[in-house]
Image: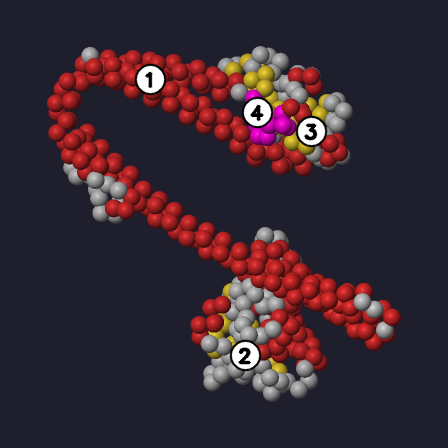
Amino acid sequence: MATAVAMLFGLIVLDVVTYVVVSRSQIQQVDSALDRAHQPVEQLAASTQLSDRLIIPQVAPGLFVAIIGQSGEVEYSTATTERDGDDDNIDVLGDDDNIDVLAVERHPGAQTVPTISGGEMRIRVDRIRRGSALIIGESLHEVNETRKNLLGVLIGGSAFAIAIASALAWWLLRAGLTPLRRVEASAAAITDSALADQRVPGADTRTEVGRLATTLNEMLDRLELSSNEREQSLEELRVSEARMRRFVADASHELRTPIAATSAYAELFEHGARDRPDDLERAMTGIRAETGRMAELVDDLLLLARLDENRPLDDDHVDMTELVLQSIDAARALEPDRVVRPHIGGVLAVVGDPLRLRQVVDNLLANVRAHTPSSALCDVTLTEIGEHVLLEVADSGPGVQDYQLDHLFDRFYRVDDARTRTSGGSGLGLSIVHAIIEAHGGAMTASNNDPHGLIVTVQLPRAEPEPTS
């Protein structure tokens, strides 16, 4: 009797939990469908072309879509069709007084509202252009029917299970108690720190308890894998957070110096420089120089942000041979005393953004100018290896330490921390190059030159030759 009562109570709890979980799962599925349909429907609804709105039922089949004007009038409305046997039941919202758009918007997320036919509909309300409201909904008729059927199945199944279980309870308890105690003892000894070492004994698919032990062991395997993945994700999150904090701190530090200098020049102007031509020219020149530094830094940060967001780049057919030679000519004009030797392995092309790829070569040559004396040689090599185009910029300067090679592409990283912000640059040049190359599907490495100097290697996918007309 006690066993039957306990089983009845357990089944009731299980039925309630199952009903609640299934109901919530169905509602979540409906909400997910509304979320997936929202973006394409919003784009069509925001259009002023009538033809765009006419295809809304094709983009969101089976969904109710309405557009409510700012003054409450219905600009557009469609219906959602439910299949019920051989009949079609059209379930729509009523006039605009059936739903208070402002009230719904005060409670973000999808909500359930009544319909004309006495049913329920799950809707999502969002504001679009010129204050209009977009309503996307899906009828809950099938969900409610499923709930009713599920409730009947749960009640009938529970009653049947209690009847069968009561008849077999005594035998099952006697036959299964001993091995279950062993399973219980083993399971109780398992802790989070010992998942890799603890497993339930008695795994045997020929018996109920053996299958239970097998299932528990499989569950422990999954828990161990999940625990390891969670630890790895947490570690990656900590590293990412530390990198972001450092990035923000470095960016703030970079901006602080030109801001302070600009403020000082402004104070000089306020303290009488306006009446002294020499001081006035000095203040204006300084302000222009510092604001230029700030603008350059902000442009670099914006470019990195765009690349981090994976914004699409141009996919033109780029002649890398011509691009590299042009960049070398510009570098020779900027520093005539330096010897820059090109080594070109033919006419090579890639697919990408020509402006960004030119920026890559210019930044690599600028890095050579900034960190090596003018007497140091610079070799620029462009070759083809398999399906890739290889660009190497090598110099005979002082080079860097081996441990610094892994950090050259980090943002705001400087090989020499003692350098001033003015002489040392912002530390974003190679970071921008690295981000651009990754956005083009390429790779970038740095290594020390022999006997001294630095080699930066860029690898990009080779483009197929353009068809000749």
Disc 1 target residue: 12
Disc 2 target residue: 394
Place residue 11 in its image quadrant. Answer: top left
Disc 3 target residue: 133
Q: Amino acid at mark 4?
A: Gln
- Position in image of residue 209 (x %, y %): 18, 31
Q: Earlier in the sequence, mark 3 or mark 2?
A: 3
Q: Which residues are magenta?
A: 104-112
Question: 258 or 278: nearer the eye?
Answer: 278
Q: Amino acid at mark 1?
A: Ile
Q: SS class of the residue under badge 4?
A: strand
Magenta span has 111? Answer: yes
Q: SS class of the residue under badge 3?
A: strand
- Find out whether the residues at labels 2 and 4 contact each other: C-beta distance under 8 Å: no
Please give the name of the residue rendered at 12% of the width and 25% of the height, measured from the top-left corner: 175
Disc 4 target residue: 111
